Amino acid sequence: MSIQNNIDRITDILRRDDGISGAMHYTEQISWILFLKFLNDYEDNKADEAFLEGTDYNYVLRKDLRWHQWACPKDDAGKLDVKRALTGDDLIDFVNKTLFPYLQAFKATTNDPKTLTYKIGAIFEYLDNKIASGHTLREVLDIIDGLDFQSSDELFELSQVYENLLKGMGSDGGNSGEFYTPRAIIKAMVETTDIKVGDTIYDGAVGSGGFLVEAYEFLTGGNKKEKLSAKDWETIQNDTFFGQEKTSLGYVMGMMNMILHGIESPNVYKGNTLIQNIRDFQEKDRHNVILANPPFGGKEKSQIQQNFPVESNATEILFLQHFMKMLKLEGRAAIVIPEGVLFQTNNAFTKVKQTLLENFNVHTIVSLPSGVFLPYSGVKTNVLYFDRKGATSDIWYYDVTPPYKLTKNKPIAYEHLEEFVYLFHNPKERNATNAKTENDCNDWTVNVKDIKDYDLSAKNPHKVVEVIHQTPKDLLKAIKQNDSEINTLMNQIESLIDG
């Protein structure tokens, strides 16, 4: 049976449990169990490697709390030892009163996110067991015990399955949707930011970790991994991926997603990115690449706003200032923003955009179609690209136009962004003017001198509808004609009702 089928079985089992309510809950509960099985196989693999090298491996987890001791103990034949395997209330009591307190205490022993101890503590600090029935938990443990995390093929398949779980959680709507950005958009953004080994990649609103995971796959996918030196591999694992996530659920999901995809040591912390005073940032704190979809529509308190040169209660404006300050010299950024950031011209928005245009090179703006983030949000969004290589001169716009209206069940696909990615890498083939063309065209270029009042919104010249100006006499004639047609229709409806 495939991993996807096994996970589907588990979600069906969990849906029947009294402690589980919705996709967010069952994804969270599957996550902690998957992680403990992953951790068991990871430590067993390290122990085998140490044995071959003639050394001993020091397990992080104490012996009685390892997977094969409490979750699925085996008899001499390798079958589940039913005499030692806890179930029912005994299993729930053990998990809630012994296992979780032990794992949650790990965080207090280290502040180094590169250590396995930190990762365990960081994940379980914000988790608890919500599965009410020990019999339900026993069924789930037995299924997950059959997964082999020492197999690279199985681990790859599991990473894809977990991605689907997160996608389902986002599609469930509610607050969980904010953690998931459609993979098609992430992939296009990663492919257009020129990531190289040695770059540091930062996301100040990690969510489920999609940007960092896609960046990792961009650096290591295909046959790239085989060509990496040992030093390159160590750099990718330990000194490439950085981020922060405010919410407990997002942090847990993000850490799990990164680890299951192969990023063993993400430098990701839980915390509110906006509590940092951006005036304190130095070049050593900054990053080469910033990829993010920060939360928008939120409001921040006045003490948070004081951390920024331009104070605003709009989280999108605060995050934009944060990312501007976090970009290294020659660095590149691609950030999802609500359309309001581009067209609003009140004091705060204008000041931030003025700084952005004068101190950074805003070279590309991608207008995304409505419905990209349904059902979580219907807000129209854009991708803002800028680098720290001087001031803005020309902005290239691209209007993403799928052949159908986006809905929850008909989401955006990578093929809708392929032309954008191609033109991004082939600037000579872009439309270099802001003039309307006779042919179908999704892109145009605007010189910064032609931008009025710092309004950066995407105004596609190829979609301008020509307005026919009529004389007052013609307008009056048209109104009378419409009234006559309406009266005729009303009379027909009345006769049908009377008849």
Image (cartoon, grey):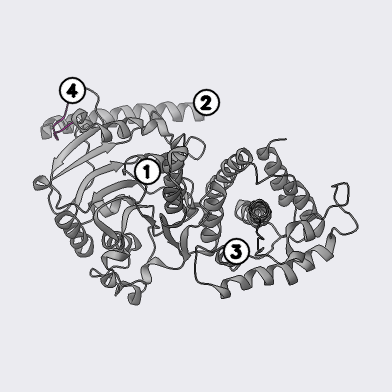
Q: Is residue 432 magenta?
A: yes
Percent across and percent down for residue 311 are 26, 70
Q: What is the CA distance from the residue labelled 4 to the residue labelled 2?
A: 53 Å
Between the C-alphas of marks 1 and 4, the distance is 32 Å
* Residue 321 vs residue 351, the one in the foreground: 321
Label 2 crowd (10 A; few <14 / some 14-19 / many >=20): few
Using the numbered discs, state the Cα–Cα distance from disc 1 to disc 3 in whole angstroms.
29 Å
Disc on the earlier residue, 1 or 3: 3
Of badges 2 and 3, the one in the foreground is 3
Residue annotated with mark 2: 499
Residue 83: x percent and y percent?
91, 58
**Which residue is identified by label 3?**
120
Q: Quadrant of residue 472?
A: top left
Question: Would you call the spot at circle 3 few (<14 residues within 10 Å), some (14-19), or many (20 or more)?
Answer: many
Disc 3 or disc 4, which is closer to the eye?
3
Query: Mark 4, residues whose alpha carbon is within 10 Å: few (<14), some, or many (≥20)?
Result: few
Looking at the rendered structure, the secondary structure element under dot 1 is helix
Sequence-wise, the earlier of marks 2 and 1 is: 1
**Left or right: 41 in relation to 338:** right
Spatial separation of the CA atoms under disc 2 and disc 1: 66 Å
Task: State the residue position of label 4.
Answer: 438
Name the quadrant containing residue 189. Answer: top left
Residue depicted at 28% across the width and 48% down the height? 384
The amino acid sitting under disc 1 is Val
